[in-house]
Image (cartoon, grey):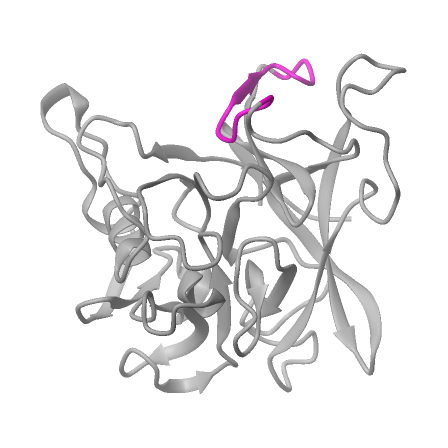
């Protein structure tokens, strides 16, 4: 169905030597993205080089990041993390993100898609948090966690994806927990936003789905297996209130079972060789479902 290549990825995490330690206040998400994508961190043998993305524009709490892969064709992610602490409610928990073609500033460009409020912490949490970023020169996943929620993580995917459509350009997507307008907080809906629709006439939205969602599932551990089962994530595009298959979400799997709180299975736990491939997987819980992020390579 998809013409993909196994593409290596790299893990960055909050407890690496020299990694940025953040409190989820203004600019924290920009700090993490810049460290992992642009500048790297650590010294000597602890040095971790960045993924080699480009930064087009930067202000105090805002920046525009673009994949280094030429296939991105000028599309970039604008991340505005200046909203923390401004209202004292759930909008404090997220950053305002949007996909822009050939940006001319933080919020302007040739094509500017609708803004999305991407949730990274629970409600107006302002303490220290944990984060993990996995990616390569084409895409990344950022997972965040804080002590206010033992059931949900923040989640952001941005970059290229395998598509079923022969898209002219704009074969990128933004996957996030949150919503549009003021509904951005960890525990919100899991959305997908495409740079362009399948026919390239506009931006488009959709959903992240798997065989594992849409059911009332048994609690972990599964009585039949003693563990959990997981399967690949797929992307749907919505057109005229109907859904169509758009592509796959690289590196991500969704868990079928109802996973427990992080007190029992910690967020950021690394599972090894679950499928006999030798690959490792980072565990998180997003929108009520356990998820795994491959730490070795993604099909892209």
Let me know if residue 276 is in the magenta part: yes
Q: In this view, does 99 lie above or below 216?
A: below
Q: Which quadrant of the figure contains the C terminus?
A: top right
Query: x, y percentage for residue 26?
Result: 27, 62
Query: x, y percentage for residue 207?
Result: 71, 61
Q: What residue sits 57% from the left and 75% below the top? A: 180
Q: Is residue 23 above or below residue 251?
A: below
Is residue 266 found left or right of 95 in the rendered image?
A: right
Q: Is residue 175 above or below residue 250?
A: below
Labels in figure, total: 0
Which sits in the foreground, 280 or 264? Answer: 264
Q: What residue sits 56% from the left and 70% below the top? A: 183
What is the span of residues highlighted in magenta in the rendered image? 264-277
Quarter where residue 236 is shown: bottom right
Please identify the dominant SS of the magenta region: loop
Is residue 117 found left or right of 190 in the rendered image?
A: left
Is residue 299 found left or right of 40 in the rendered image?
A: right
Query: x, y percentage for residue 75?
Result: 42, 70
Q: Is residue 6 above or below residue 25?
A: above
Q: What residue sits 35% from the left and 85% below the top? A: 108
Let me know if residue 165 is in the magenta part: no
Query: x, y percentage for residue 158?
Result: 48, 57
Quarter where residue 284 is shown: top right
Which sits in the foreground, 256 or 26? Answer: 26
User: Residue lying furthest front in this view?
Assistant: 88
User: Residue lying furthest left in this view?
Assistant: 44
């Amino acid at each position: 169905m998809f013409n993909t290549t196994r593409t290596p990825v790299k893990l960055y995490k909050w407890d690496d030597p020299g990694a940025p330690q953040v409190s989820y206040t203004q600019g924290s998400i920009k700090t993490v993205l810049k460290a992992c994508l642009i500048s790297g961190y650590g010294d000597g043998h602890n040095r971790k080089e960045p993924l080699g993305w480009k930064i087009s524009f930067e202000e105090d709490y805002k920046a525009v990041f673009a994949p280094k892969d030429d296939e991105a064709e000028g599309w970039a992610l604008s991340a505005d993390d200046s909203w923390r602490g401004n209202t004292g409610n759930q909008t404090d928990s997220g950053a305002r993100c949007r996909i822009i073609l050939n940006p001319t500033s933080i919020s302007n460009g040739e094509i500017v898609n609708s803004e999305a409020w991407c949730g990274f912490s629970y409600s107006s949490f302002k303490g220290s948090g944990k984060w993990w970023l996995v990616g390569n020169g084409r895409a990344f996943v950022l997972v965040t966690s804080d002590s206010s929620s033992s059931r949900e993580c923040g989640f952001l995917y941005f970059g290229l994806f395998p598509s079923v459509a022969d898209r002219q350009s704009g074969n990128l997507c933004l996957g996030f927990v949150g919503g549009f307008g003021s509904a951005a907080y960890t525990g919100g809906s899991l959305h997908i936003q495409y740079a362009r629709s399948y026919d390239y006439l506009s931006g488009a939205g959709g959903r992240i789905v798997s065989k594992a969602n849409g059911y009332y599932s048994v609690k972990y551990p599964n009585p039949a297996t003693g563990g959990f089962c997981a399967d690949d994530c797929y992307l749907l595009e919505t057109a005229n209130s109907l859904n169509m298959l758009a592509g796959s979400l690289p590196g991500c799997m969704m868990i079928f079972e109802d996973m427990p709180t992080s007190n029992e299975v910690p967020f950021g736990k690394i599972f090894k060789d679950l499928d006999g491939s030798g690959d490792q997987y980072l565990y998180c819980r997003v929108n009520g479902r356990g998820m795994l992020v491959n730490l070795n390579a993604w099909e892209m």
